[in-house]
Amino acid sequence: MKKLLFTLVALMLAVVAGATVPPGYYSAANGLKKDKLKQALHNIIGSAKTLDYGSGSGKTWYGFYMVDRLDNNQVCDRYSYDKRYFSTGSYSAVGGMNIEHSMAKSWWGGNKNQAYCDIHHLMPCESTINSKKSNYPMGLVTKDKNGNGCTKVGTGSAGSSSINLWEPADEWKGDFARVYFYMATCYSNLNWQSEGLNQMENNDWPTLQRWTYELLLQWNAKDPVSDLEKKRNEGVYGIQGNRNPFIDYPELAEYIWGSKTSEAWTEGGEDPEPPTPPTPSGDLPSETFASSLGAFTPVTYYGESTGVWAHSSEMKCAVGNAYSSGKVADAWLVSPEIDLTDYQSASFAFSHAAGYHGQNKPKDKFSVMVTYEPDKALNPSTADWEEVYVPAWPGSVSSGFSSFVESGIVNLDDHCGEKIRIAFRYESTSSACWAWEVRNFYMSGEKRPSGVDDNFAAPLDGEQAVFTIGGVYVGGEVPQAKGIYVVRSGKHSYVITNR
């Protein structure tokens, strides 16, 4: 039976690049949140048919040969830059390497259980660094004492304490983050002990200590899933029959430990369809940018910026990026005309991410603008614009893109009574050319009470008159008492709320 399984695995690996998540595999996790979502995933992935531990056919090194063998038989070593090679067709241990538990086996007492042989977290490792990293937790090493140029080993902060830690190279940080998410989910039932208690907790949620999952969420976002990681996940699935859900759907970590714990997760891939934004008020616009730029218009202020603002079918958003368009740009994504004439309050919000900006702040290059001259807005240099305050911006990244963040509510109360346009302004130079992703733009607002101008008339021409919201005249001045009052001055009316 094992020989048949191994043959099927070999065939499967030949076409792994086109593999997908089996239909219905995660269906039991759909619609769940936080701890319940984590428990459902535990039930899905918790049982695996692991290989025997050791060297030879049907054992761990066979698994490594199947899932960690690169071109020319090179071993994929995530702990060292040294190059070592499998012997063709041999499932024996590679000289100078060990079977490494990314989570030390001493953390659960060293019992030779399923976790002991689970190659989702077992990997080939150069022997010297394996010994130096010992059974330490994984984290940010601030003082590297025994590293090898790839893996750091030394001391660093774990919450409020300074302890011994190891830290993977930047190119592997996301991989190990997703391995740890898997371990904390698959084996939340283990009795964590020893050094493990510096990283883990004995509970169903969160299982990972707070300092750990906050760090791993950053690594998960900064180092996206690679084709190599996907291929390994498929290979291990072919051997063990269980998958790493955080490779299939990296956003799961945010629903369990991160910014989306109050939201229910729905299976949809690495980049699920953006949620439908709230229904806008009255005739105020909304735009997801999921399938196009919609009614928004990309225009150029100056620079070689043709095509700077475009739709991304992959990320389902609008993207501003001048890297391939001369780098120097001032490009605007302008909304349709927005009529706030009858509104007494209005606001908008959106989600956004930034890319390739390193430690620089996106708000130093990008901005959101409003104009009272909608007829001139499609030629930005001829209209008067003012910048509006956006509460939240994407954080820094070492490479690639940040995670999407909610902008927070952008207040437009001062713009009520007018017709306006809103614009996302992208600026770049030859030395600072970043990317900006925007999606899920929506507006909300409150109109003035119906019929105010007809039903609330001043008793004497030219005098200011104040009414309750029910239409009762209370005099020429707004009372001190709490309430909502309609003020009529000349031909205009407005609402004041006393709190």
Image (tube, rainbow, N blue to C red):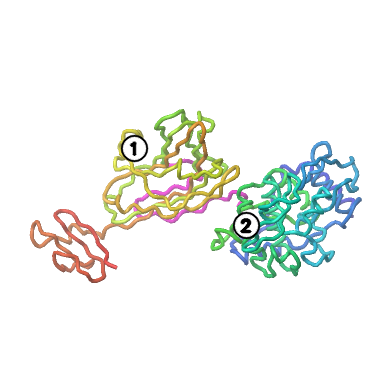
Q: Which residues are magenta?
A: 265-294
Along the line of sight, the residue nearer the viewer: 106 or 330: 106
Quick check: 35 above or below 253?
Answer: below
Along the line of sight, the residue nearer the viewer: 498 or 249: 498
Split into 4 quadrants, where in the image is the N terminus?
A: bottom right
Q: Element type at marker 2? A: helix
Residue 213, magenta (yes or no): no
Along the line of sight, the residue nearer the viewer: 97 or 307: 97
Q: Mark 1 — residue?
A: 377
Q: Mark 2 — residue?
A: 253
Q: Quadrant of residue 131?
A: bottom right
Q: Is residue 415 left or right of residue 194?
A: left
Q: Element type at marker 1? A: loop
Q: Amino acid at mark 2?
A: Ala
Residue at x-position 17% and y-position 64%: 466
Q: How far from the left and from the top, in percent, is residue 436?
A: 50, 42
| Residue count near mark 1 (Cα–Cα under 10 Å), binned few <14, some 14–19, many ≥20 | many
Split into 4 quadrants, where in the image is the C terminus?
A: bottom left
Q: How far from the left and from the top, in percent, is residue 174?
A: 67, 50
Q: Earlier in the sequence, mark 2 or mark 1?
A: 2
